[in-house]
Every structure is written in C-alpha cells, then in structure tokens.
C-alpha cells in the first residue's frame, strides 16, 4: 500500500491509460453505450426513487448521468470515475468525484444513496459480483441499484471467427448473466432485461476500431500475430443481406430495490 491506497495492478493501469487516452473521442464512438444509458435512465424514471444522493459509478464521460439529469431536472447526480481525463469532459457545473471504485465506495459520501446507477463500467472492475453486493448494501432503505452490463454471449461473431481460424479469441472477458443475478436476492430484483445490439461495418477493422477510440481494447489475452489476425478477419461472419461484418453486444439491464 502507498499513501493508504492500494497500488494499481498492471491491468488496472492499462485500463485507466486507455480510457484517459480515449476521453476526447469516446462520445463520438459510443453509440451502443449512449443507447443503453438512455434506456437505463428511462427504466429508472418508471420507478419511485426518492430524491437525495444519486450516484453514477464509473461515469466515464457522463452519458448515464446526463440522461438521468435530463429526465429528472431537479436531481443532480454525483459522477464518480477513476479517469481524470474522462471527468474533464463533463460540463463545468457537473458534480464529479475522482475515485477508484476498486477501493470500494468513497468513504466521504454525505449520506446513503437513494440511487446507485452504473452503465458499461462494472465489467472493468475487480470482482464484479462482490461490487454488486457492496453497492446494494450501501443503499439507503428503499434505495435502488440500476445496472447495465455487457455479459458473456457478447461478440459471438468474434468468438466464431477465432474458432474457425483456430486462433485465440482476444475479446474482453465479461461476467455471466448468472453471476450478476446471483449477487442479489431474487425478491429485490424489480426489473431485468437482456438487450441484444448488432453493429455492422464494411470491414473487421472498421468494426473493432471504435473499441480503441473508446478505450475499451484492454484484454487479458495474448495479442494475435499479423498472420493470425489475417485468418481471423477472413473467417469473420457476414450479414447475408448486405455482406457486411457484424459484432453483437449482449447487455444485462437490471434494477433492484433494497
């Protein structure tokens, strides 16, 4: 430990560096993330969530917080992220806090939150299953946990191409639907939905390039050699209608009340 804080692992430093570097281009590429953030905010609007402290954990550039505030104009959102560069993209009036969520929730929260929301960030944290338990436990009585998380089953085309090409699939590792659901008492879950979104592009490079521009290219897998990438792209599935390459996201949307 240094200065009372855990030292970051090489993986955590890599993820942080990628997101810092991508902070200026993130919003231009984050089409799936924007859609899901808005969808999650709309589901929150359908619930009776008390005013008070609302958190957006792993806020990035603030897509979810912006949607929540737009739909709840009298409510401000505390936007928490480990990336200083991502937080710098928020409007000056925004309520932001620089914090590493791998250390747990900030210790100086003024009160228990009535909403803890998070979109497309949980899978980047250590031990997502226990993070969910921690966040739910921190809620005020009657408070809400709202999550959107890409899960296993995503990038099926990538996995299929890797299998056909007989190369390692270097797509990011994602939590399973079951691991997220079992982190909570079933009686507390008030809404759950699995959303499938398929992106298309004329080439595999065009399909995967937005991941880099969003800072989402980190992987625990060994990178492919040039010849392996060539075989992967040659075996990538195409859409029968327009012969474009495809990439499918599977996203778990979940709301639970304490």
Image (spheres, rainbow, N blue to C red):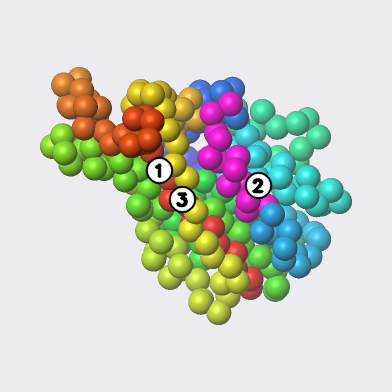
**Residue to which mark 2 is pinned:** 38
Q: CB of mark 3 within 8 Å of CB of mark 2?
A: no
Residue sitting at 75 percent across and 31 percent down?
Answer: 91
Quarter residue 175 falls in = bottom left
Q: CA distance from mark 3 to mark 1?
A: 7 Å
**Residue to which mark 1 is pinned:** 248
**Residue 205 seen anywhere in this rendered image of the structure:** yes
Q: Secondary structure at mark 3?
A: strand
Q: Secondary structure at mark 2?
A: helix
Residue sitting at 44 percent across and 63 percent down?
Answer: 180
Q: Residues within 10 Å of mark 3 (few under 14, many from 20)?
A: few
Q: Is residue 155 above or below residue 234?
A: below
- Which is nearer the N-term, disc 3 or disc 2? 2
Q: Which mark is residue 196?
A: 3
Residue 154 x %, y %? 37, 47
On the rendered structure, is 10 left or right of 234? right
Q: CB of mark 3 within 8 Å of CB of mark 1?
A: yes
Residue found at the very far left of the displayed protein: 166
Residue 83 x %, y %? 56, 34
Q: CA distance from mark 3 to mark 2?
A: 15 Å
Q: Quadrant of the C terminus?
A: bottom right
């Amino acid at each position: 430990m240094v200065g009372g804080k855990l030292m970051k692992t090489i993986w955590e430093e890599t993820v942080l560096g990628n997101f810092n570097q991508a902070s200026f281009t993130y919003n231009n590429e984050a089409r799936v993330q924007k859609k899901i953030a808005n969808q999650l905010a709309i589901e929150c609007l359908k619930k009776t969530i008390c005013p008070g402290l609302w958190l957006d954990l792993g806020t990035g550039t603030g897509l979810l917080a912006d949607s929540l505030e737009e739909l709840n104009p009298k409510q401000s959102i505390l936007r928490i992220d480990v990336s200083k560069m991502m937080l710098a993209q928020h409007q000056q009036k925004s309520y932001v806090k620089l914090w590493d969520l791998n250390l747990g929730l900030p210790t100086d929260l003024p009160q228990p939150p009535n909403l803890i929301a998070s979109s497309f960030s949980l899978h980047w944290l250590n031990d997502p299953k226990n993070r969910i338990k921690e966040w739910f436990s921190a809620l005020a009585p009657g408070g809400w946990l709202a999550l959107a998380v890409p899960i296993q089953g995503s990038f099926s085309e990538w996995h299929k191409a890797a299998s056909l090409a007989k190369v390692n699939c270097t797509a990011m590792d994602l939590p399973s639907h079951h691991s997220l659901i079992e982190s909570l008492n079933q009686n507390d879950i008030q809404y759950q939905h699995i959303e499938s979104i398929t992106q298309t592009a004329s080439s595999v490079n065009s399909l995967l390039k937005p991941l880099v521009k969003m800072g989402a290219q980190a992987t625990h897998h060994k990178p492919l050699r040039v010849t392996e990438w060539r075989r992967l792209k040659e075996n990538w599935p195409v859409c029968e209608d327009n012969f474009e390459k495809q990439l499918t996201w599977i996203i778990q949307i979940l709301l639970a009340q304490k």
